[in-house]
Image (tube, rainbow, N blue to C red):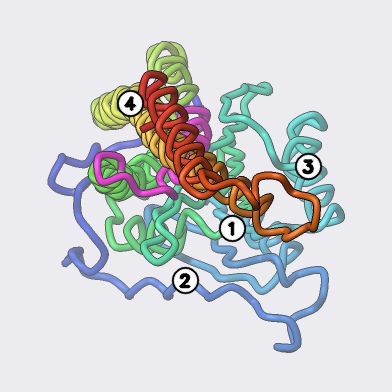
């Protein structure tokens, strides 16, 4: 951060004012512009400029329409600060900024490629900060992450967004409505951005906590889709950890340089407050991951128990079916014996001695009975009947 100290220092009341709370006299700040849309007449190489403004003494003194005009206006305003907000800028725009503000080529490469992990690096008098913002989407019940790159120099702040979050127009509106805070310069803008990103984690934490409560209910209710939901939420928590954990070290690094770079004492207090919030959020996210791991283990146990119960029921059904088959087979064998005897004596061949025998009929009946009783006794002893 810059070594210059700016006075007067704002009180906590001023630092926490929201848009519209400023009652100090003076011209009202121009409202932040919306993101340019294709086909609105904006030059193709300037459509990524969401808002570019020049401030002096905490007041907006110029709203240039292009990067080149912003450079000129900053040179014309001694002691002023430029705040340039970009959304997915082109390579030419980033190279133009690098040439004007002497930005390091490695930082520019990171800003071009995006998909960076949160980090804080110092290149001379310029800080390069990468942040991962998050927002909770109620309809799909998922967490959406955005990437933000911030260049902070002695008289400029450049923000490069690569996602929908965070809403920096709200941050700019807050700062413009609190001139005492904005008058502290780029350090104060960096604080406000960090504060907005960290505050944006709170709704995400609340949404995830609600999802975990629902998942616990679904697990014990036996919902078959709960395993997929646990896995998806676990993946989101991994991303959330990657967004919050590095912030703790980054803020401690900023705090370690307070004395060296002459950071305003009031800003020191509020950066410590942001660090406390980040630490709390990081601990909550770690707890969420542990809880999801435990829930997944419980769900796996319940699924295994359910599968075992189903297999046991299937085995019992198979056993019962086998017993019924044995009974049917036994009775079929018993009934087959008299059928066989009756079939033989019913052929009516001419030369069948038994047909002329006086005791032929009683003998056939007796034979059928003996065979049937014998089979019944055998099957009964084997437990088939």
Residue that appears at 42% across and 41% down: 324
Secondary structure, mark 2, is loop
Is disc 3 surrounded by few (<14), some (14 to 19) or many (20+) residues within 10 Å? few
- Mark 4 falls on what kind of element? helix
Q: Quadrant of the C terminus?
A: top left
**4 vs 1, front mark:** 4
Find disc 4 in the rendering and name its residue.
298
Main secondary structure of the magenta stretch: helix
Q: Are marks 3 and 2 in contact (CB under 8 Å)?
A: no
Q: Quadrant of residue 171?
A: bottom left
Q: Earlier in the sequence, mark 1 or mark 3?
A: 1
- Residue assigned mark 2: 32
Report the front residue among 57 and 299: 299
Question: Residue, x 49% and y 33% (percent of image)?
Answer: 371
Q: Nearer the viewer, residue 338 or 48?
A: 338
Q: Are marks 4 and 1 in contact (CB under 8 Å)?
A: no
Region of the chain picked out in magenta, as a range = 219-243
Q: Residue 256 or 140: which is nearer the viewer? A: 140
Query: Residue 226: within the magenta?
Result: yes
Specify the label residue 85 is tagged with. Answer: 1
**Tag 2 or tag 3, which sits nearer the N-term?**
2
Residue highlighted by disc 3:
113
Other-residue count near label 1 (Cα within 10 Å), few / some / many at <14 / 14–19 / ≥20: many
The image quarter containing residue 173 is bottom left
**First in sequence: mark 4 or mark 2?**
2
- The answer to whether the residue labelled 2 contacts the one labelled 1, judged by CB atoms less than 8 Å apart, is yes
């Amino acid at each position: 951060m810059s070594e210059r100290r700016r006075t007067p220092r704002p009180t906590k009341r001023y630092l926490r004012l929201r848009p519209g709370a400023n009652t100090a006299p003076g011209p009202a700040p121009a409202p932040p512009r919306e993101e340019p849309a294709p086909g609105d007449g904006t030059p193709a190489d300037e459509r990524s400029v969401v808002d570019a403004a020049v401030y002096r003494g905490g007041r907006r003194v110029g709203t240039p329409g292009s990067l080149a005009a912003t450079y000129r206006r900053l040179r014309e305003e001694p002691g002023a600060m430029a705040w340039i907000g970009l959304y997915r800028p082109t390579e030419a725009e980033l190279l133009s900024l690098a040439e004007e503000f002497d930005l390091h080529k490695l930082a520019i490469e990171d800003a071009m490629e995006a998909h960076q992990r949160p980090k804080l690096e110092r290149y001379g008098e310029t800080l390069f900060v990468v942040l991962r913002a998050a927002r909770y989407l109620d309809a799909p019940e998922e967490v959406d992450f955005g990437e933000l790159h911030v260049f902070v120099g002695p008289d400029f702040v450049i923000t490069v967004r690569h996602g929908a979050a965070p809403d920096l127009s709200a941050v700019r509106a807050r700062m413009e409505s609190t001139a005492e805070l904005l008058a502290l310069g780029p350090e104060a803008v960096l604080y406000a951005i960090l504060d907005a990103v960290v505050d944006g984690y709170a709704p995400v934490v609340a949404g995830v906590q609600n999802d975990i409560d629902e998942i616990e209910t679904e697990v014990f209710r036996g919902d078959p889709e709960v395993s997929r939901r646990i896995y998806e939420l676990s993946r989101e928590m991994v991303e959330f950890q990657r967004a919050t954990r590095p912030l703790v070290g980054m803020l401690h690094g900023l705090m370690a340089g307070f004395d060296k770079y002459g950071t305003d004492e009031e800003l020191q207090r509020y950066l410590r407050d942001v660090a406390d919030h980040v630490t709390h959020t990081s601990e909550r996210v770690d707890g969420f991951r542990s809880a999801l791991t435990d829930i997944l283990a419980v769900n796996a146990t319940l699924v295994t128990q359910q599968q075992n119960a189903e297999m046991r029921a299937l085995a019992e059904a198979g056993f019962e079916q086998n017993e019924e088959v044995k009974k049917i087979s036994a009775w079929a064998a018993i009934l087959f014996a008299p059928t066989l005897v009756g079939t033989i004596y019913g052929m009516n061949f001419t030369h069948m001695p038994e047909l002329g025998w006086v005791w032929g009929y009683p003998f056939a009946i007796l034979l059928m009975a003996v065979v049937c009783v014998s089979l019944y006794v055998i099957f009964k002893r084997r437990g088939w009947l």
